[in-house]
Amino acid sequence: MASLAPAASRTSVELALQGNRNDVRDRVFSAALLLTLLISLFVLIVLLWTVVAEAWPVLTDRGFGFVTANVSSFESRAGVRQGLIGSVILIMFVAVIAVPLGIAAAIYLQEYARDTRFNRALISNIRNLAGVPSIVYGILGVAVFAGTLRSITGPDSAGLSYISGGLTLAVLVMPFMIIITMEALRTVPRGIREAAYGVGATRWEVVRSHVLPYAAPGVFTGAILALARAFGETAPLLLVGAVTGYLSPGGSSGLLETLQGKYTALPTIIFNWARQPGEEWRGLTAAAIVVLLVVILIVNLVAILLRNRYERKW
Amino acid sequence: MATVAAQDERVRASLRGRAGRRRKERVVGGVLAGASIVSIVISVAIVLALVFRTANFLAHVEWSSMWSGIWRPRQLQFDLLALFLGSLVVTGIAMIVATPLGLGAAMYLSEYAKPRARRILKPVLETLAGIPSIVIGFFAFTLINPAIVKGIFGATSPFTMMAAGIGVGILTIPLIASVAEDAMYAVPGSLREAAYGIGARRRTVSLRVVFPAAISGIVAALILGISRALGETMVVAIAAGATGNATRTINPLVGNQTITAAIASLAIGSDQVKTTGQGLNAFEVLYLLGLILFVFTLLLNVVSERFVRRLRRFH
């Protein structure tokens, strides 16, 4: 009796704490929330599956030949070689221009700039630039890079050249790069900066030898994500003249002539093929998308691996 | 006295460091500041390019043609309302898709998911965010349109605004989820604990405590979503059929154009569009469309930033 009473009162107390109603509605609510995430997962899986299923006949038939074949108006011969080369060259522009400029601007805004009204406006301006639709950057490209600066970007191709396309993508990606780098710099603990200042380091010495190495993994991943984003960007390239139709394989010309010449890119080829009627073109489009997604996924994987490697130092 | 002053000066000089080191410091600071000024140059270039080219277009176009009832740039008919309605339909459908899915995912990740579930589920949204829009456009055209729009809503066209809207919605989910989750995650734990302390359930805490406390950030997420959906080009260009023409309709079961898709189809249009003669290239209307798009999205982004700042002040 003496041992039973507390147990009995415990269950009654627990029942009272649980409330009168059962928790079914709570569980239904949490299941509904989980469902929204699972729908996104489901969409992702169906998307990848659809693309691979559509691409399967082309990829098994042609194998790697599809990647090395030139653009052609015959379904059986068309490949993505020029698009892949074009995209890689465009990405070089982003890597050489947008990434260093973005990192430098972020260092200035996060480590150097005082909290003045001007600098706050500068940061807010960058946030707004990051929200400008990509096609507007295409208009900037066609008006400024292909128009005003035509004598530099390509006098013979009406300015619709690698240089214009690469600059447009670089300008598009730069705000994104600045924001990501600023976030990475913000995670560096104050103590690291103060310790370096304490032994007499100048601001640049603090940034270069202490803040940047600490923030490197974040900056690195940011840069790689920015490149991946530029790789899949299509809309601005339509304006800055990536050729959507036939493009000659190109002879041997100098570097500058090539860069000032006409070009195409992988996403533009995908867009062009997607608009062709017929089942064969649909398969080709899907196959080109598989190539695009494989590149983007590999790039992301590299980002993760490099980040893990760097992180071990700290 | 003199020796103290001299010593003082020596100490100061050594604290200041060598001249070369100071010069290097100034140069580096200048270079970094210059890099951040580039962003202003970009903004100014965008605004100038849009304004000047638009002014040139407006000086040559017949103004009544911008209210002609149909968008047919080849015949110099630039009915802006047709494109506005198109953008409205696509953005509306996109938000109907993305709002529940994005906010639900945000609330689950912020309030319900255990750390391990978070580690597995969050990359799903990140991967979705990394898929290029042209891929979503292909998906909307090859699967969403036949399976959902034709199958459920009985559309007959291979190109529909609804397929485009759903595709844009899928693109918008990760953005809404990520901004809204940040807002909910930032709600102080003490608010939740106070509610649990008086016996509230998790659902009550999520809906009545966390949701209202994070409402500024959630509104910001939705506004950013609208801005993103409004600016999306490739999904619409593929799934709604970039034929070049548009009509005043809000029927989502037919193909039509948005502001962005109209810019894209002008850009890839044949030479006919680019040289219409009469002192006016139909092509040039794209600067006006770009300016309109720029102003709309800029306003939305500024408003959403206001909301985010209000959230920060609140906590």
Image: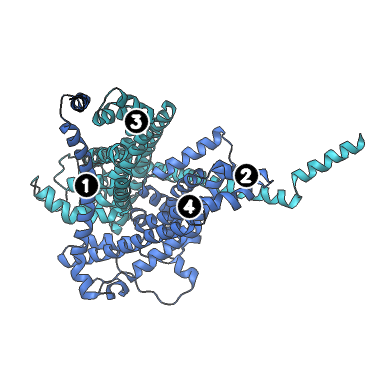
Chain colours: A blue, B cyan
Query: Which residue, given by chain and number where applicable, does mark 3 sit on?
Result: B214
For the residue pair B305 and B235, the one nearer the viewer reads as B305
The type of residue carrying mark 1 is Leu
Q: On the image, numbered disc 2 is attached to which residue?
A: A195
Mark 4 or mark 1, which has the lower sequence index? 1
Q: How crowded is mark 2: few (under 14 residues within 10 Å), some or many (20 or more)?
A: few
Determine if marks 1 and 2 fall on one subunit.
yes
Q: Are marks 4 and 1 in contact (CB under 8 Å)?
A: no
Marks 4 and 3, how far apart in space? 29 Å
Question: Chain under label 4?
Answer: A
Distance between the alpha carbons at the discs numbered 4 and 1: 31 Å
- The tally of labels here is 4
> For the residue marked with disc 2, what is the amino acid?
Ala
Task: Pick out the residue farthest to the right.
Answer: B2
Position in image of residue B128 (x %, y %): 29, 51
Answer yes or no: is residue B48 visible. Answer: yes
Q: Pointer 1: what residue? A: A38
Disc number at residue A219?
A: 4
Amino acid under disc 3: Ala
Q: Distance between the residues labelled 2 and 3?
A: 37 Å
Question: Given this view, does label 1 or label 2 mark the residue nearer the observer?
Answer: 2
